[in-house]
Image (cartoon, coloured by chain):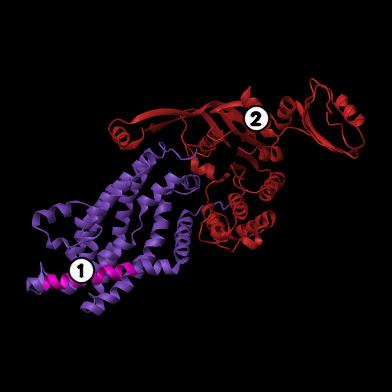
Chain colours: A purple, B red
Amino acid sequence: MRVELTRPAAKYWAILRTQLQNSFAYPLDLLARSVTILLFLWVFVNLWRVTYGAMGSQRIAGLSLADTMWYLLMAEAVMLSKRDLSKDISDQVKDGSVAYLLNKPFNFILYHFAAGLGDSLLVFATNLLLGGALVWWLVGPPPGVLGWAAAVLAALLALLLDFCISALIGLAAFIAEEVSAFRWIYQKFLLVLGGLLIPLDFFPEWLQNVSRALPFAWIVYGPARLFVDPSAARLADVLLHQMGWLVGTGLAVALFYRWVVGQLTINGG
Amino acid sequence: MSAIQVRNLHKTFQTKRKAAGFGGSLRALWKPDLHPVEAVREISFQMEQGELLGFIGPNGAGKSTTIKILTGILHPTGGEASVLGFVPWQERQKLAYQIGTVFGQRPQLWYHLPAVDTFYLFGKIYEMEEKALRQRIGYLSEAFEIEHLLETPVRKLSLGQRMRCEVAASLLHKPRLLLLDEPSIGLDVVAKQRIRETIRRMNEEEGVGVLLTSHDAGDIEALCKRVIIINHGEIIYQDKVSALKRRYLTSKQVDVRYSNALEPDFAIPGVEMLKVGTFGAKLRFDVRETPVERVMAALASAGSLVDVTVSDPSLEEVIRTIYES
């Protein structure tokens, strides 16, 4: 009955595929999630048109209105497609369903990674497609192929980095149950210091330096800025920062998981 | 080899207490009032391979905590346990291939997808071959009578239908041991009966051992040969279900109907008359104090008998007696 040679990769691929099927179960919900990006981009383009007009300049901190809008498209696409893993884990601990995930022959963290990736990739692609069409119509054509390639690569690493930070917050639910305060703080860091609200280039230099020293910029700003300026130097800068943070947070997740799994209390017995 | 061996297993949780109101919340923030709760206290028991063992007790007795320790999800505070030769909390993933679990109050099937999608996903997770998986799904679908339900999204199934799919999903990988935590909770009588019959069939055909927790004594009565009763984290009784009944089954209840009218003051010495009607009566007596033949003779002499039903007390009553003693 059981295959002698185990195929661990196949099980995570199956989880990813099943999550994709699950996301397709409600196509209208999927579409509604992507409509959010259209709304945000519509507000942003009007806001930035006024700002550029008031400044009387074609460029602010080296970015044109078109650059800013394509930057915001990539930033919002990453932000809106990332799965709220910390909430997922916290909910599973609170309702006790974590019991089913811990007694299956897979790694709990990799399970969430596969399921999250299945969902995120679909929403990311839909967001890019719909949001891209709107931004093209509003401010002109997108950056070249190099920009797409560099940004998509960095966006994948960004989703992975976000996964690790969200996993750390989510795993805290094993001991604290409620982690919404930590989630809220993390989201606000992404919003301001991550460059989601405005590109970091518009910040004073000292704040840019602070932001670059933290992981949040490499989740939002890194891929978005690469999209409009895909130079080799910037690509190397973004990827190196992302990988550095990935090693650090990945190790932290592995160690933290080993500890908290022994501390778990499941509601309802 | 025993399927499960447990020795002096102990689990203590720290729970926070908080006084009512905003002030209480602030005080709890500043100085949390932590209290240890002993969910499981030094329990020891053994279960043989292929055995049907009932684990019963009221809500909060420690049944679910014990099952979660035995599956490796919770780490005990003290004691030892071995499940199919594995220490559950140290070898959780290896053990997972050998056991199936159902936590009655929580779904494991993907809610928005048809059950068959979860079955195929589980097949991959348990690293089963495609052909073997298809055969297994066919076999379990027939056994659990769920062929017509497999392609319906789980959210559209009734609770009874969903539970049949849940138990079938837990048996996909042919586990040697099935741990069922309240599998019949919320089910109606017919649905309960169907689940029980299929579990018994799986036990007979595949030799899968079943550890069943329930606060419905009917589950244990219908399925198990041996029973462990747990209360406040301690084992208060463990023996065969039949021995339990013999020891605590000391009273009989009799419902009797006559073709003629009974005397209004009809009574039998040493018997509690629960109800006396015109054409029938309901009574209860302790067999240690009043012999059965004396009661039956008195009933026969009271008139022309149409029907007699003699019943034992339900297991719920038996458990209540143990708790009270």
Which residue of the protein is positioned furthest toward the top in this rendering?
Answer: B289
Which one is nearer the viewer's eye here, B322 or B272? B272
Amino acid found under the numbered disc labelled 1: Pro
Which one is nearer the viewer's eye here, A110 or A231? A110
Q: Quadrant of residue B85?
A: top right
Q: Quadrant of residue B311?
A: top right
Q: CA distance from mark 2 to mark 1?
A: 74 Å
Q: Which residue is mark 1?
A: A230
B206 over A201 or under it: above or below? above
A167 over A10 or under it: above or below? above
Secondary structure state at the residue bearing disc 1: loop
Nearer the observer: mark 2 or 1; the answer is 2
Task: Kindly check if marks 2 and 1 are in contact, taking CB atoms under 8 A apart as contact.
Answer: no
Task: Report the side of B24 relative to B314 (left or right).
Answer: left
Q: Magenta stretch: residue A48 in it?
A: yes
Of the 4 image quadrants, the one containing the C terminus of chain B is top right
B189 over B234 or under it: above or below? below
Q: Position of residue A51 (x, y in %)?
A: 12, 70
Amino acid found under the numbered disc labelled 2: Ile
Chain bearing tag 1 is A
Look at the image and tell me whether residue A63 can be seen: no
Look at the image and tell me whether residue A146 can be seen: yes
Q: Which residue is mark 2?
A: B319
Q: Position of residue A186 (x, y in %)?
A: 26, 51
Q: Residues within 10 Å of mark 2 (few under 14, many from 20)?
A: many
Which one is nearer the viewer's eye here, B323 or B208? B323
Task: Report the side of B323 relative to A5 (left or right).
Answer: right
Q: Position of residue B42 (x, y in %)?
A: 53, 25
Q: Position of residue A109 (x, y in %)?
A: 40, 49
